[in-house]
Amino acid sequence: MVKSPAIDKLKALVIKEVDSHHDQLRELSLKIHSTPELGFHETKAAGWLTQYLKKNGFSIERGISGLATAFKGSYGKGKPAIALLAEYDALPKLGHACGHNLIAGSAVGAAVASEAAIDQLGGTVLIIGTPAEELYGGKAIMVERGAFNNIDIAMMVHPGVHDAATTQALACISLDVEFFGKAAHASARPEAGINALEAMLQSFAAINSLRQHIKDKARIHGIITDGGEAANIVPAHSAGTFIVRAEEDAYLDELKEKVLNCFVGAATATGARLEYRWAEVSYAPLRNNMALARLFQQNMQSLGRKVLLAKPTKAFGSTDMGNVSQIVPAIHPDFAIAPKEVAIHSPEFAQAAASEAGIKGMLDSAKALAMTIVDLVANPETIARVKQEFKSK
Ligand SMILES: [Zn+2]
Ligand SMILES: [Zn+2]
């Protein structure tokens, strides 16, 4: 990190800016929290966020990449173009149990605060609203449709149970499966039926056997979404959704084939017909830009938080930020909002996402992101270093 009185002054200014927006950012994130919207239906959240950005000097494009609830805001002009990413989708039944309301608040907070740096030093700060992170890989679609072209750097933060400048995220794809059998009276004419539920249960058994022999960190998990109509009818139809994850894309491809064979085998064993559909987009593994992560770490630490470079855990999920990080230098740090016993995607984490610790983490993250933008626009060499690292891998 380059130090100079001018940079320090600018950082103090962006911190003051976030503080002056404290009440509005808090209100915005709590409003999103209390109005959970599922992926691609985040109409209210996208509306509130773009309204706030517009009121604060950003020019706004709504519905980018052909996605109604995606948006782009920009302030300033020319290079470098630094993007902050906002997520705002919730989970079925659990609401904001992944704390995306805090991601949205930190991104818009950082965007508005960094106007001071852009005014003095030039460049562009972009804020990209990315819908449907949880289930549909909104960013993966937006990457394919060019939303991140002409961007130099992309940054976002995610709430969690650690303060850490990097995280690991697995490559991931989902699979929908259906079995078609034949209905019959389960007691009077069982021999006339073909049991689609048994095919699904056989598939789970086969996957459980496979799991013993897969690589460390790979994951296979699923649910049954249709298991029949009544106990006295041989189930003519069953359905399920599965997710397959691996540390690398190449192993994910290998694993996909093995998982699919579990269903094919079950279809053969039971006589049920298999139909399956892999999701159109897969989540790529996350590439952490270490030069960028260290800048964020130092800025977040200057606010009095102890920030690790890597999370002290082997438990990882997936994120569509992985896809962005494959084409643009990127970071996806975690900020702690709950004790480490609390599991993300739980009711307790949803509570934490509306707590004082949640709001504090969101505001600190907004400050650290804005301070990192100061570091970047103030020093072309810093951006060159970030890009060099990205190219060298
Ligand atoms: Zn999340
Ligand atoms: Zn999540």
Image: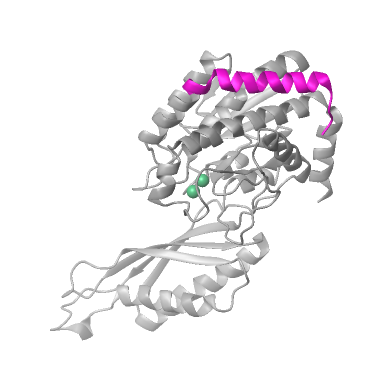
Quadrant in which the N terminus is drawn = top right
> Which image quadrant is residue 57 in?
top right
- Residue positioned 50% across, 38% down in the render: 357
- Give residue 120's position: percent from left, percent from top: 75, 14
Can residue 131 be seen here? The reply is: no
- Residue positioned 50% across, 70% down in the render: 260
The furthest residue to the left: 188
Left or right: residue 49 versus residue 16 is left
The furthest residue to the right: 381
- Residue positioned 41% across, 44% down in the render: 350
Q: Which residues are magenta?
A: 1-24
Whether 236 is drawn above or below 269: the answer is above
Can residue 307 be seen here? The reply is: yes
**Most common secondary structure along the magenta stretch:** helix
Whether 129 is drawn above or below 270: the answer is above
The furthest residue to the bottom: 191
- Residue positioned 21% across, 82% down in the render: 192
Task: Please name whichever residue, 85 or 360, is drawn nearer the observer in this view of the structure.
Answer: 360
Whether 391 is drawn above or below 226: the answer is above
Left or right: residue 58 versus residue 29 is right
Whether 327 is drawn above or below 22: the answer is below
- Give residue 372's position: percent from left, percent from top: 72, 31
